[in-house]
Amino acid sequence: MQKRSNFSSKLGFVLAASGSAVGLGNIWRFPYLAAQYGGGSFLLIYLILAVTFGFTLMVAEIAIGRKTGLSAIGAFKVLDKRFSFLGVLAALVPIIIFPYYSVIGGWVIKYFAVFLTGGVHTAAEDTYFNSFISGTFEPLGWFFLFIALTAIIVLCGVEKGIEKVSKVMMPILVLLTIFIAVYGLTLDGAMEGFVYYIKPHMSDISVKTVLAAMGQLFYSMSLAMGIMVTYGSYMKKENNLESSVRQIEVFDTGIAFLAGLMIIPAVFVFSGGDRSMLSSGPGLMFMTLPKVFDSMKLGGFIGCLFFLMVFFAALTSAISLMETIVSIFRDKFHWSRKGACLFVTALALVMGIPSSLGFGPLSFISWMGLTILDIMDFLSNSILMPIVAFFTCIFVGFIIKPKAIADEVKETNGKFKGEKLFTVMIKWVAPIFLILILVSSVANTFG
Ligand code: PHE
């Protein structure tokens, strides 16, 4: 039996898990949703959901990992054979996400390189982004580079690779985010955007707001894809699980909030208050923001820092995806870390190529107007993740029982302050909401 690796300290665990949670979702998706769904009221709802729903699912996943010392497939199976399918489903999510996430990671490195070499004007041109992603070899090259960087870190192991890198990158990420946000707020006219972002617009609150916030939350916290189970399996019993989860939540939500501060006021200044500029997805990050940077003083420099920060965020998330897949193969087939890393790298390269080419040579392949990359995203985030989260709740709530998780949480000092909340959430509230999320995301896509 191989000895299981560990994070050396609680701080190491919290930073690595936060590294997973803080990613592209925090930086472009959160600000856009907040802008669309009523500013302050969205923030408020998101906050409430984070400390109830997010807390519950994250505690459950980390505890399952730490209790069994296994990644998702093994963990669910050991606890109850009938739920082996759940481990397999959970394992599928990172296998689908990792390749296309790395395609976008490649775009981020490319933009960092362009800004670093003084290309802010070029990047701001209307056709720049589309002509880049519709190429064949250039996007593939950046995608390969991103995967190679991720693989090298994962190859170095949990403590020497993941933990070390997280301990360096995460603090830098926080500093960069704060710096850029503060700079953005000093621009003339930024206050209007700031007020728009912070002030609650109660009339914008609806069931849709809540569902949008909920979907964002569990994507943002890297839930329902076996990541937190895997990272939990590397956590020592003497490290407090409950307070770790609280810290990860603060980290993830804090960065999302700051990303909004960074982006919304700056876009407001640029567009003269036209909030339709806050479009969703890659358009905001790769088309609108370069224009915003191009229009501001020191924009080339700020843009360079911005893409560096996004790169750190994306890389630490990709690491957690890859580590989760690697640990699944290692648990199952007892492969060496090196062998598993090589295999997963090759798998991700092969799987990611169609997503990359889907904007160029393979753009004739589409389904309901979605590109190959969008289809992968839809399958994993809108279909598989709510299903996995739902069954995780049923599994904990009714099969192994919330007490089994509570006992694991109490291993450190005998306490679990959120136990009552946890029990009610995991048995009743969360499963009901998850069904609603699933129905609404399917309806949104097909409706
Ligand atoms: N949590 C990450 C984010 O907010 C997204 C992510 C999803 C990361 C899946 C890893 C795996 O962007």
Image (tube, helix red, strand yellow):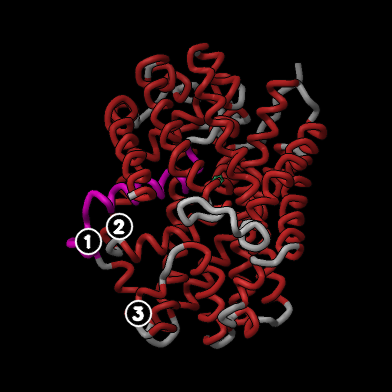
- Residue at the (41%, 50%) spot, across then down: 216
The disc, 3 or 2, on the residue closer to the chain's N-terminal end is 2
Q: CA distance from mark 2 to mark 1?
A: 9 Å
Q: Quadrant of the N terminus?
A: top right
Q: Position of residue 276 (x, y in %)?
A: 36, 74
Callout 2 secondary element = helix
Q: CA distance from mark 1 to mark 3?
A: 18 Å
Q: Nearer the viewer, mark 3 or mark 2?
A: 3
Q: Are marks 2 and 1 in contact (CB under 8 Å)?
A: yes
What residue span does the magenta drawing correspond to? 200-223
What kind of residue is marked 3? Asp
Callout 3 secondary element = loop
The disc, 1 or 3, on the residue closer to the chain's N-terminal end is 1
- Residue at the (74%, 21%) spot, across then down: 333
Observer able to see residue 23: no
The disc, 2 or 1, on the residue closer to the chain's N-terminal end is 2
Q: Position of residue 251 (x, y in %)?
A: 48, 51
- What residue is disc 2 on? 42
The part of the image, by quadrant, that contains residue 78 is: top right
- What residue is disc 1 on? 204
- What residue is disc 3 on? 274
